[in-house]
Amino acid sequence: MKQNTVNQKPGLEFSKLVQNIITGTKSWSVKVTADLMSMTVDKLRSRIRLDDNRVPFSPEEIRSLIAAMPDVRIVDYFLEDSPFIAAKRYDPNVELEENIHQFTAKFSIEAAEVYKVVQESLLDRKIDHQEKILILKEIQDAERELASLKNLLDPTENK
């Protein structure tokens, strides 16, 4: 997990992340997110403020946030310095074979993205810092899809 600096209040980095996700995408708004979390807009705004009046998210609110706004960056924030990766759950309303097909297709796409990014990065016969970050992001996305497929095929292994 990210370390707080001496002058940084606990939870500030997480609040910045959530604020960036909400304001940086067309999919989310403070109102929509607050409604999905069964929270008032003012209460959610107090959680994502970046000043000294910010109120940290409670564990229950974080759980509600993840359910309401299933953006993997939120889960990755908490898993960053751990040996764990976030895996998607399968859709119980879809037949097993269709879930397997979907997860396999997603993994194949992500693995192809890793290959593409590596090939493009090696055109000049070296990988710079920005290219390394992009490659690692693509690897993480592929790992997540593969872990999701593995969890679908053998859910007992993860218990």
Image (cartoon, helix red, strand yellow):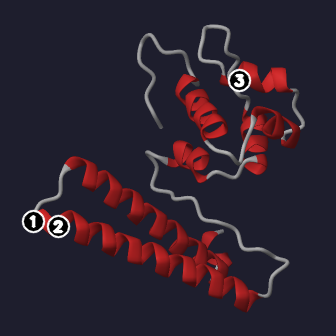
Assess whether mark 2 and mark 1 are in contact (beta carbons under 8 angstroms).
Answer: yes
Front: mark 3 or 1: 1
Q: Residue furthest left?
A: 125
Q: Residue at x 34, y 56 (%)?
A: 134
What's under tag 2, amino acid-wise?
Answer: Leu
The span from disc 1 to disc 2 (Cα, nearest Å) is 5 Å
Query: Which labelled disc corresponds to residue 125?
Result: 1
Q: Reply above or below: 150 against 15.
A: below
Which circle, 2 or 3, is nearer the viewer?
2
Question: Which residue position holds label 3?
Answer: 47
Read off the residue under disc 2: 122
Give the SS element for disc 1.
loop
Q: Is residue 110 above or below residue 133?
A: below
Q: Is residue 112 above or below residue 129?
A: below
Amino acid on which disc 3 is placed: Arg
- Mark 1 is on which residue type? Arg
Residue 61, by quadrant, is top right
Q: Is residue 76 left or right of residue 58?
A: left
Q: Which residue lies at the image location 84% right of the left edge and 26% below the top edge?
A: 41
- Looking at the image, which is closer to me, 146 or 44? 44
Mark 2 Cα shell of 10 Å, populated few (<14), some (14-19), many (≥20): few
* Upstream in sequence: badge 3 or badge 1: 3
